[in-house]
Image (cartoon, rainbow, N blue to C red):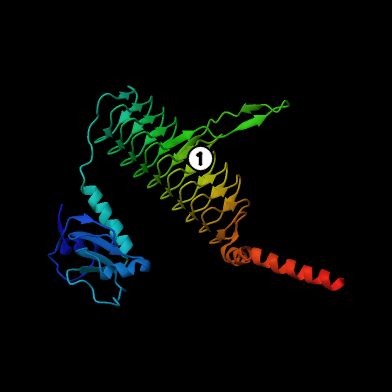
Amino acid sequence: MKFTSQQIADLINGKIEGDKNILVNKFSKIEDAQTNSLSFLANPKYASYIYKTKASVVLVNSSFVPSLPLPKTLTLIRVENAYESLAELLRYYDNLQQRPQGIEQPVFIHESAEIGKSVYIGAFSYISEGVIINDNAQIHSNTYIGKSSSIGENTVLYSGVKIYQNTLLGNNCVIHSNAVIGSDGFGFAPNKDNEYTKVSQIGNVVIRDHVEIGANTTIDRATIGSTVINKGVKIDNLVQIAHNVEIGDNTVIAAQTGIAGSSKIDRDVMIGGQVGISGHLKISKGTKIAAQSGITKSILKENSILQGTPAFDSNKYKRSFILFRNFPQLKKEIEKIQSELYMNKK
């Protein structure tokens, strides 16, 4: 598909500087873009590439002021936020792609399952007793949906997703390949002989609208009640969310994070990669947690920025790290002073 710079600008309410009729047919990163491609500049770290890019069209922020001459073949489209405009264009382009339709064979669909309009079900999928799949949902191949589960409108389950029984998925969600939703919580009770008896997990998982869950992520069902992922939450690949956890609206969780049972995370929280959060904690609204941090106690102050293990204020952590990095030199200086003191005593 080909688009003119004018067509692109009209879609994102941009202002053109250059050739309004120049054609583009692909997206490219600005550092390795080729002719007839569309790129963008949002991060100042990449600003140097715009002066030598081969891209035909580049999205830039309205505030962008070039410090060097731009390529004569380059057309700019100025927008309020280049990254948001790129995301909008990518969504538009993705929607133009032909979506799969119909029910492939072989599949198993229980006679009691309810299948809405314009639903796609890929080959080798298994739809259990009492399942409800609402209009325009996409169930890709080799997917399992356990009994009495519900899949919302326009929700997409990619190949290999496993949905355990009684799971409720909202509208406009995306679940990527091999995610497991509703597996047993990690519940075992030691007896007098220090043997572990399994605690049955009879709850479920509830996922609200507009949630995206990455590949190979696991979300455990509640022991009693529900594990809840609220509206607009975005979860990366390889994340573990334990039983009875609650995640607030618009929270973002990066890869390899683990959240232990019954922790409550408020809305608008940002969690970096490889973060560990202990069980039965509360994380307040707007908290930001740096990658590889360990949260061992509740964070009650809203909009906190935390780093380290155990995590504490990020600015204090950075100052402390400067001292830590200098410990070898400090050790040498202390040993030198101790040696001089010892010699003086003699």
Res 79 seen here: no
Res 100 seen here: yes
Residue 55 spot, x, y in % from top left = 22, 63
Count of residue discs: 1
Residue 60 lies left or right of residue 310; in this view the side is left
Q: Vertically, is 232 above or below 188?
A: below
Amino acid residing under circle 1: Thr
The answer to which quarter of the image holds residue 326 is: bottom right
Residue 281 lies left or right of residue 162; in this view the side is right
Within 10 Å of the Cα at label 1, are there few (<14), some (14-19), or many (20+) other Cα atoms? many
The residue lying at 15 percent from left, 52 percent from top is 1
Q: What secondary structure is found at the residue carrying circle 1?
A: strand
Residue 187 spot, x, y in % from top left = 59, 33
Residue 334 lies left or right of residue 174; in this view the side is right
Quadrant occupied by the C terminus: bottom right
The residue lying at 33 percent from left, 69 percent from top is 47
The answer to which quarter of the image holds residue 334 is: bottom right
Query: Which residue ends up furthest to the right in the rendered image?
Result: 346
Residue 36 spot, x, y in % from top left = 17, 59
List the residue tagged with mark 1: 227
Q: Vertically, is 289 above or below 134?
A: below
The residue lying at 35 percent from left, 26 percent from top is 126
Residue 38 lies left or right of residue 149; in this view the side is left
| Depth order, front residue of 53/86 | 53
Q: Vertically, is 225 above or below 338?
A: above
The residue lying at 62 percent from left, 31 percent from top is 188
